[in-house]
Amino acid sequence: MSHTPTPLDTLTDLARDARDQAGQTLASERLNERQVAGQLESLGRYRLEYAQRLQQAMRDGIDPATMRNYQRFLDSLDDALARARQALGAQQQRVGQSQSHWQQQQRKLSSYDTLVSRRAMQQSLKAERQELRASDDLVNTRLLRQRHNHHDS
């Protein structure tokens, strides 16, 4: 049985599309977060290795100019790490906002689904009542005929 979409069906479809779109955005933001976290981790490992090289060079004996170069490079790595931490924090905020948006869209869809379910239940009850009425009418009509036929004989 085909059924003409109601405004509620349209709203439910739109809400489902919005929820799915919010889910795709959330997945993308989470992927970006993992990438930024990976970059931060790699940068941190590189900085640690470079600092260990400086320690080794200092044990082996190092001239002041080379020492300054190591220190400058370590400073630039520290700046890059600070920026990467900021970028990760900003990305985590975007993930949080995307997650909130997805949850909001999911709640909206759930409320429409609840309305659709209620409407279906009401229609089902209405159909059952009509069927019961029709059945009662048939029984009453049959009883009246039987009484009428009984009186005639």
Image (cartoon, rainbow, N blue to C red):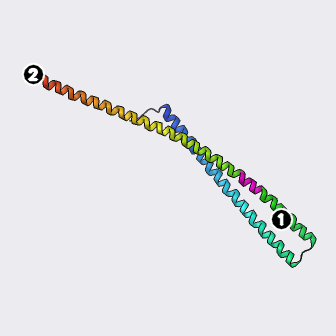
In the rendered image, the residue lying farthest to the bottom is 60
Q: Which residues are magenta?
A: 83-89
- Up/down of 36 relative to 99, above or below: below
In the rendered image, the residue lying farthest to the left is 153
What numbered label is drawn on residue 151? 2
Upstream in sequence: badge 2 or badge 1: 1
| Left or right of residue 30: residue 7 | left
What numbered label is drawn on residue 18? none
Q: Closer to the camera, 18 or 51?
A: 51
What numbered label is drawn on residue 74? 1
**Residue occupying image coordinates x 41% and y 36%:** 120
**Residue occupying image coordinates x 49% and y 35%:** 9
**Residue 56: image x %, image y %?**
83, 76
Categorize mark 2 by other alpha carbons within 10 Å: few (<14), some (14-19), many (20+). Answer: few
* Amino acid bearing label 1: Leu
| Left or right of residue 105: residue 118 | left
